[in-house]
Amino acid sequence: MTIGVVGAGAWGTALAQAIAGDGSAVTLWAREAEVVETVNRDHVNTLFLPGLPLAPTITATGALDAMAGHEALLIVSPAQHLRAMLSRIPVGTTPLVLCSKGLEAGTMKLLSEVAEEEYPAAPIAVLSGPTFAHEVAAGLPAAVTLACADAALGGALAARFARPAFRPYLSTDVVGAEIGGAVKNVLAIACGVVEGRGLGQNARAALISRGFAEMTRFGLARGARAETLGGLAGLGDLVLTCSSTSSRNFSLGKGLGEGKSAAELMADRHTVAEGAFTAPVLRAAARAVGVDMPVVDAVCALLDGSATIEVVVESLMTRPLRSED
Ligand SMILES: NC(=O)c1ccc[n+]([C@@H]2O[C@H](COP(=O)([O-])OP(=O)(O)OC[C@H]3O[C@@H](n4cnc5c(N)ncnc54)[C@H](O)[C@@H]3O)[C@@H](O)[C@H]2O)c1
Ligand SMILES: O=P(O)(O)OC[C@H](O)CO
């Protein structure tokens, strides 16, 4: 029995590479024929992870039927395509490990809720944390949260995926792991704006801290546990993504800060900046549970062009004074 990975963008490919690190066979489904061809022939993903040699035990396929019969399937499609992808895979009762970060537009659902709707009989786990794909694929050390309501299954999956340079920590808090990953992408856009506009390191630290307060308020309202949000999938990933132009979300924000429009920055990109899609969904989801998320609101305004950076900064800085918690 092998592990199957659905989605051969940078992260799906990096996860396949990490799992194949002990000689395990991995089947990697790719949407692009070029990826199938170059992974199988040259052991490299030229489109999404160029320059990183891949293990020969990774077999790429363009056939979703080939994903049947695996021990577990890692789902790594962009959040807005996840439901459509799932509906085309022969899942049955195979455990699904969700590795994407976002909320579904329209329904405002967590990806685990989407997966449960599509496959009520399939156990669901979430793998999330501070992990730039190129570092994981290069074998640099990284740690993630592996969340599964069924602790025994979570433990078995973690043991199957753990490698000397890839360390999963266990949790039963699926909701917390998902909310951490979805919210941090939006906050990374805000930190990128600070960088692009030259607003300073103090402002970035304030955004990380107050952004984490927003993540926590929203997460607790949706049933997440505080310790999950303060762990790898929440605070850990927030710190990573808010600090580096290796992040597509941070880079998108940096472009906004430099004066480019979101439309300009999103045009023609073939890699995904999930925060741009998550932001308006998160704003609506937060309002639905009565949670105030001013930094998320500010990111939405910058993305849709309804406010300038100056207006957004002034409105954040002049909000009524309040207690920090
Ligand atoms: N790249 C990372 O470092 C990283 C790390 C952790 C989590 N993630 C998450 O993994 C998910 C996938 O991101 P990525 O970085 O692997 O992608 P990517 O940006 O490297 O590649 C884009 C992916 O989108 C797919 N795609 C494009 N159009 C599609 C469609 N219509 N239907 C289905 N798939 C389509 C492509 O096939 C490709 O797999 C995202 O939710 C992301 O937040 C990424
Ligand atoms: O490049 P980003 O902003 O999608 O971030 C990648 C990962 O989610 C970091 O953990």
Image (cartoon, rainbow, N blue to C red):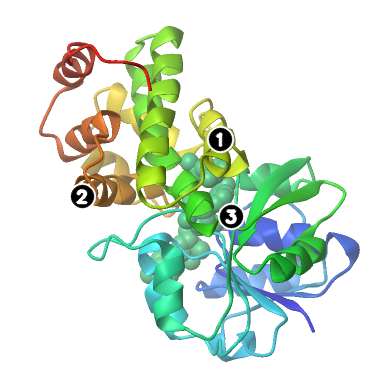
User: Tag on residue 70?
Assistant: none
Q: Is mark 3 within 8 Å of ligand 1?
A: yes
Q: Residues within 10 Å of mark 2 (few under 14, many from 20)?
A: some
- Displayed quadrant of residue 122: bottom right
Mark 2 to mark 3 CA distance (whole Å): 29 Å
Q: Is residue 32 visible?
A: yes
Q: Residues within 10 Å of mark 3 (few under 14, many from 20)?
A: many
Q: Which residue is mark 3?
A: 10
Mark 2 residue element: helix
Q: Which residue is mark 2?
A: 284
Left or right: 47, with 40 as reference point: left
- Which is more toward the observer, 236 or 277? 236
- Which is more toward the observer, 191 or 292? 292
Q: Is mark 1 within 8 Å of ligand 2?
A: no
Image position, residue 46 (x, y; %): 61, 58
Mark 1 residue element: loop
Image position, residue 182 (x, y; %): 42, 48
Residue type at tag 1? Gly
Left or right: 268, with 121 as reference point: left
**Residues at circles 1 and 3 in contact by the CB criterion of under 8 Å:** no
Q: Is mark 2 within 8 Å of ligand 1?
A: no
Q: Which residue is mark 1?
A: 230
Residue at figure coordinates x 15%, y 23% from the top left: 308
